[in-house]
Image (cartoon, rainbow, N blue to C red):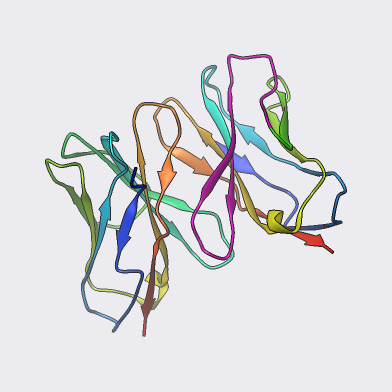
Amino acid sequence: DAGVTQSPTHLIKTRGQQVTLRCSPKSGHDTVSWYQQALGQGPQFIFQYYEEEERQRGNFPDRFSGHQFPNYSSELNVNALLLGDSALYLCASSLGQNGYTFGSGTRLTVV
Amino acid sequence: AQTVTQSQPEMSVQEAETVTLSCTYDTSENNYYLFWYKQPPSRQMILVIRQEAYKQQNATENRFSVNFQKAAKSFSLKISDSQLGDTAMYFCAVLFGNEKLTFGTGTRLTIIP
């Protein structure tokens, strides 16, 4: 049973560029949440997708957007990258309130 | 505001000893779920233990157990017979009614051989 898969594992982007991160949820899960984890910090909630719609959103600017596809996979897009966007981006999938299953994350470095 | 606080940035303990990690939270809700996650250098967040707020019995999972004090809004993790593989960051997290998992800032635990 595959867990949560994220791609790519690492990437380096230049300030001002755009980036797309991808997530495939655990089999049977229908909800995908995205988190940003700065170095030495706890994960911060970006947004959550359910039934292809953004169900709720954390305190992140509109430069952060997402999408969920009919197969429940999801993308996180970040436009106009800033140096401060450098972080580990975690995707988590869930079904109800049984807890979240996390992927290994994508390490984004903005230079 | 719903917040989760971990007041111990770092802890270390000798192998085979017992260690307790602290977590407090703030909410006006009555029904929620509490979790402890472990994050090793591999980065993946691994579920250690889960507790439903409506259950009075403390959850246990092998060497891991919790002390859940609902009135005090406290949720500590006890690791017994600690092993070298327990070395990791540990995050307390609470799933509130809005279904947003909120994390604390983490405790870096080091098990000393």
Could you say which quadrant of the image residue A41 lies in? bottom right
Closer-to-camera residue (B58/A16): B58
**Taking A66 as reference, is A58 left or right?**
right
Q: Give the side of residue B23 with respect to residue B34, left or right.
A: right
A94 inside magenta stretch: no
Q: Is residue B27 above or below residue A83?
A: above
Magenta-drawn stretch contains B37: yes
In the current view of this chain or complex, which residue is farthest to the front?
A: A1
Q: Nearer the viewer, residue B75 or B3?
A: B75
First to last magenta residue range: B36-61
Where does the C terminus of chain B fall, quadrant-wise?
A: bottom right
Residue at figure coordinates x 69%, y 40% from the top left: B23
Picture residue at 40% right of the left edge, 31% below the top: B99
The image shows residue B9 at horizontal and vertical percentages of 72, 57
To which quarter of the image does residue B80 belong? top right
Total numbered labels: 0
Q: Where residue A14 sits in the image (x, y, percent)?
A: 28, 84
Question: Quick check: B55 above or below A101?
Answer: above
At x 51% / y 51%, what residue is drawn? B45
Q: B50 left or right of B56? A: left
Question: How far across and down, in percent of the image, does residue A110 sit?
Answer: 36, 79
Name the foreground residue: A57 vs B62.
B62
Residue at point 15% right, 42% down? A71
Residue B63 spot, x, y in % from top left: 74, 38
Q: Quadrant of residue B13?
A: bottom right
Q: Is residue B18 left or right of residue A17?
A: right
Residue B87's place in the image compared with A1, above or below, is below
